[in-house]
Image (cartoon, coloured by chain):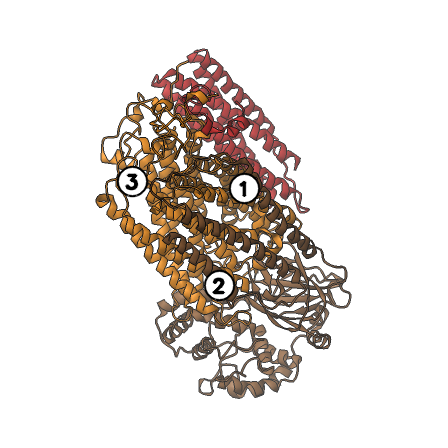
Amino acid sequence: MSFLEKITARPWEHAGEMDGVHGEYKTLQSASRTGLMMFLAVISSMFLLFMITYYTRSQFPDWEMLDDPRILWANTGVLILASIALQMASNASKQAMISRMRNMLIIGGLLTLVFVAGQWVAWEQLVAAGYYAAENPANAFFYLFTGLHALHLVGGLFFVLVLGYRLKQKDNEQKVQQGVSLCATYWHYLLLVWLALFTLLLRT
Amino acid sequence: MATAIGILILVIVTLLFHFLSPWQFTEIAADWGSIDFAVDLTFLVMGIVYVLLNGFLIWVVIKYRHRKGVKAHYEPESEKLEWWLTIITTVGVVAILAPGLWVWARVVEVPVDHEVVEVVGAQWHWSFRFPGEDGVLGQTAVREMSVDNPFGMKADDPAGRDDILVHNGEVHLRNDTNYKFLLRSKEVLHNFTVPQFRVKMDLVPGMVSYQWLKTTRTGRFEILCEEYCGMGHFAMRGSVVVDENAAFEEWLSGYPTYADILAEPEPDLAAGQAQYAVCSACHGANGEGNAALNAPNLAGQQDWYLERQINNFKHGIRGSASGDTFGAQMAPMAATLIDEAAVRNVVGYIASLPVSGSPATVSGDVERGEEIYGTCKSCHGADGNGIWSQNAPRLKGVNDWYLERQIQNYRQDVRGSHPQDLYGKQMSLVSGVLRDDQSVKDLVAYINTL
Amino acid sequence: MSYVAIADRDHEQHMHDPQTFITKYIWSQDHKVIAIQYSLTAIAVGLVALVLSLGMRLQLGFPDTFSFLTPDQYYQAITMHGMIMVIYLLTALLLGGFGNYLIPLMCGARDMVFPYMNMLSYWVYLLSVLVLCSSFFISGGPTGGGWTLYPPQVILPGTPGVDGGIVLMLLSLVLFIIAFTMGGLNYVTTVLQARCRGMTMMRMPLSVWGIFVATILGLLAFPALLVTGIMLLLDSTLGTSFFMPALLSMGEISEHEGGSPILFQHLFWFFGHPEVYIVALPAFGVISDLVSVHARKNIFGYRMMVWAILSIGVISFIVWAHHMYVSGMNPYFGFFFATTTLIIAIPTALKVYNWVLTLWRGDIRLTVPMLFVIGFIFTFINGGITGLFLGNVVVDMPLSDTYFVVGHFHMVMGVSPILVIFGAIYHWYPKITGRMLNDRLGRIHFWLTLFGTYAIYLPMHYLGIQGLPRRYYAMGDTSFLDQSTQAMNAGISIAAFFVAAVQMIFLFNMYWSRTRGKPSGGNPWGATTLEWQTPQTPPVHGNWGEKLPVVYRWAYDYSVPGAADDFIPQTMAPDDVPTTDDSYHGGEGEHS
């Protein structure tokens, strides 16, 4: 039933159980996914506003471009690999291949750590080259974007750790599988955000 | 029933209030009758809506209040009725929006023949710049601003040389003339508002905004800052005086161009010393002051402040109010300095005098004074040395009995009541913080410790 | 397939009934307890803001008699008053309080879908309140930059609280946003995923619709505040120049260069305007339910009400710059934003019509909640009308930044939602406590509050038309204000004190009726919605006992022709409806 049909229904005309007709009687699994999707919408709103702000500011005549460190390319590659690893973990969990899933989770987590460390190195390089945050808006935006993005990844890592703990506790298999799949979605999303940010940072 | 009557009373009170209240638009002084028209039209349309909706509300509350045995009518919706209501509302909205946008198009579009005035806002005072003969304002930059160049004029821009700089919160305008105000701020947001002009616009640091109007009647009007700009926001007042042509020209000719200011010679200390002989009788040979003669110490005070006060005395802006007996003594003395150059020379000489301390004669609760000083420090500085950009003189080292008397003068509107003494007015507004004589003593006692 | 409803997952450990006092009332994951925690905290911090406003009124009404506040303190008071009222009271109370209490009960769920996160949401909210209030006790005090926190002034000397107040304010806002996001994800997901059998979207009460859409607005709009908050924090602590241009502060040229203050305003109001509707939509929803219950009539034009909520929600994202007509932004934007702003007036007006049309041909019970409904409609008409003045760009020009604006937003965002909140408390208090609030005290409270607040805010509009600027610590002598202005200001202040005192009646009533009120039974108002059909009153943990409710009809079956009672609960199956004659329709036969 389309959204439009839903909200044009005349609810007073139908009394009755309506079970299945509007089948909105969901499971915890789908609730978690809905929650995650809403959360991604929130982050999207935040990053989108940042990017619009950044782009608008970059059109001012006094804008000075920043020399983006080379290491960002390598970091991007690492993040792509991390995202792939998470996806493989999710696939493995669906086929109930527990040890493969665990290994992929560990690899994905480590790759993410490498990415965060790589971003840190990029910061160090910039500071060493004299690009201080207070110097001009382009620098400040760079630190802000990369910092916030890395913070979101670290938050994701926390959930991977929780998953690891649950695995150890031999927790409800269905829940773990659900968790891995959500983590994979989150990683893909943050990869997309990073690609968008990176493109924007390179272009301006 | 009581409920309906209650609401009815409120509606009637509102209508009476609208028609009887003494608080209406000020008499307009710009050619913006069209804005007033848009407001009146909105009042009319909305007034009708207000009466109809509330009338209907009152009626249904009376008519359909609970009665035994009467059941509510069952009708989930009426598409037809809702369509009609939507259409009528849309028509009403268009009826006020369309004229509004039409007037707005005029507000946005500046006519070709207009004069330009730059309005400069700063914490917490106004100043103005006229483009001079070439009709072009010279470039400015924040980096250029200093005590000698408060407008931040760029010395290398020839267009700025003939700009007339009015470093004063009072500006005059020609009657019956289109003016485009270019709005610039030195540090925070301000808003240039004259209620009688109807239009207003923010001053935003880092950019130049504008507004325009045509003056339509002579008179003196108050400028208010209407965008919150910090502690002194409420005291950021100025004046616009709309003059006929001749009076305006005369006023404008009293202000220097940027070139004039650049060409000002260094003060002649020898001449200043000669002039100072008159002053030294009361203020002492070294400007150390003399309490017995009610003459404060001068040495160490900022030169721009002394210059302004001497000029105020000369022009009857200070010392003319009844109750200011000592100020009245000073006025003829200041008149002995014939011209601007003489004033500058004397002030230059005073600046060269050695600074000596001032003995404490006022005692009070220093801790309470420190609390009170929290308000003062936004302009006079935490160290009491004064801040040029706030037009606030040094307090530290000034004779305490003099400070006490002047603060009392401000509190009692003896000082700061002259319409042209805008900085004084600021002080008299802020002095409202001091609730009694003891507070003044406490404050002065604290300033003694600085 | 067999459904595993979230609401049915009693087997999971955290649905076990809490045993100790601490797990029951402090670290509780029960949405009803969290709702009460949210509400009481919001009311407590709201009382702080009320006291601040009284201090301001003393200064404004009697500037020569009471030098109670210094300018610094006055500006700190207006800042904290505004911020607390808008964010920490209204947003928290309407969404954290009412949202938490009503969503699961009205949707037929046992709890929110993520109860643990819900609990965290409250505790982070409490932390944000504490951080905010702690700024009263640091040196320099809280920030006095105005609730809009406009840079550059908010982080420059000359504004009170630059030493630490502003940092605490921004930190507190960041915490609040985190708390709101945790709560908001819960409300939205619960509405989408945890409704009981038969509860379709269009069978939901409008309260749920209002809260639901408001929460989505909040989730999308609060990030804008977060973004500005973070950037401002960096500007003030690290010396970056996001919003700070080159400037001359206190006689010295600052290090900043190239930032844009207007950018801040765009971002702030991109949050700030939806925020108005974050407060208004839940109030709209609640008022729709109250008016329907107490007029014994279905809400008129339910579908239109839903569409209006949705369209207001969408349009509210493209009207923000009507707060910036005189901000120095490109004046041509005025055409666009004036148009969108007046367009949003249309669905809002339709809502007002439908409330009044619900009363029309109704069976109006003038209960205390109904009085508040009528009071709300009256003040909202007033506040909505003045909104059309300010939304129309050219009419706004002379009125902007005057007391007209103060009068307008207090009428529309202060008095109106507060009347809704009062009405809602009188309405749902019996469900929350099992006892009625005292009726006589309620009536006294209503009339004194309505007349008192009107006496405060109506004159403000006219003072503003005359040109009285807002955010002025003192006017001094002016040539353009009528001599009587100061007398009116004093009168307004007296009315403000009166209204504040009257609220003590309400607080006393809440306290007294808790133990001594008339026992209410489960459904004192004869309402149809699910929260009144719980097996126990007050509802216990898990809300519904053994079996989840099943919904057979929409939320507004009042005075249905042929039915014996003037209301049919949502849980009543068509065949069970007691009828008086054959005119009753509404059984399975009509099911298409």
Q: Is residue B442 left or right of residue A186?
A: left
Colour used to depict chain A in the structure image:
red
Q: Colour of chain C?
A: orange
How would you rate the neighbour count of disc 2 (Cα within 10 Å): few for under 14, some for 14-19, many for 20 or more?
few
Q: Position of residue B89 (x, y in %)?
A: 58, 45
- Name the residue type under label 1: Pro
Q: Which mark is residue C430?
A: 3
Instruction: Residue C233 in the image: state x and y as whole percent.
Output: 49, 46
Q: Nearer the viewer, residue C454 or B363?
A: C454
Q: Are marks 3 and 1 on the same chain?
A: yes
Q: Are marks 3 and 1 in contact (CB under 8 Å)?
A: no
Q: Please identify the quarter of the rendering in which residue B8 is found.
A: bottom left
Residue type (three-letter) at the residue carrying disc 2: Leu
Q: Is residue B176 above or below residue C91?
A: below
Chain ID for label 2? Answer: B
Residue at image mark 2: B16
Residue B211 percent location from the top left of the image: 66, 59
Which circle marks residue C347 in the picture?
1
